[in-house]
Image (tube, rainbow, N blue to C red):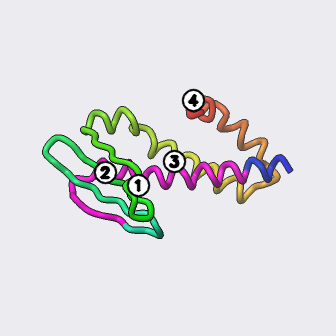
Amino acid sequence: MVYGEILSTERTYVENLNKLLQYFVHPLKSTKTFGITQDKVRLAVYRSSQYTTILFFVKNFCFLTLSCGAAQVNTMFGNVEILANFHRVLLGELEQRPARAAELLLRYADFLKVSG
């Protein structure tokens, strides 16, 4: 029961980190102007010489507008890719070795404390 809750939480966390990377971090770091459409979500990314602006639409409603310079992007999202990679590895190990979940969590405890 506890293992199932840990696994479910980790899956959700990895899924949300992946969305954060796909819809915000990678577009903000991009050097191009482009658009993404997936399901009912549309993303428009515009670049100027100093800023990247993201327009985030849900069902044709502009839900969020975000403009950032490179320094702001690094301040806000500097470690997100490292965090996402770590949690993908942890999730994979938890899925492959359910009987050793406690051992895995203890092995990664220091990183989990820092990333939490």
Question: Quick one: 23 or 71, which is closer to the camera?
Answer: 23
Contact, mark 2 vs mark 3 (Cβ under 8 Å): no
Question: Quick one: 22 or 91, which is closer to the camera?
Answer: 22
Up/down of 4 relative to 108, above or below: below
> Dot 2: what SS?
strand
Q: Which mark is residue 54?
A: 2
User: In the rendered structure, which disc, 4 or 1, sits on the residue that comes first in sequence?
Assistant: 1
Q: CA distance from mark 4 to mark 1?
A: 25 Å
Q: Amino acid at mark 3?
A: Ala
Q: Which residue is mark 1?
A: 23
Locate the C terminus by quadrant: top right
Contact, mark 3 vs mark 1 (Cβ under 8 Å): no
Q: CA distance from mark 4 to mark 2?
A: 29 Å
- Crowd class of label 1 (few under 14; some 14 to 19; many from 20; radius 10 Å): some
> Dot 1: what SS?
helix
User: In the rendered structure, which disc, 2 or 3, sits on the residue that comes first in sequence?
Assistant: 2
User: In the rendered structure, which disc, 1 or 2, sits on the residue that comes first in sequence?
Assistant: 1
- Magenta-drawn segment: 7-36
Contact, mark 1 vs mark 2 (Cβ under 8 Å): yes
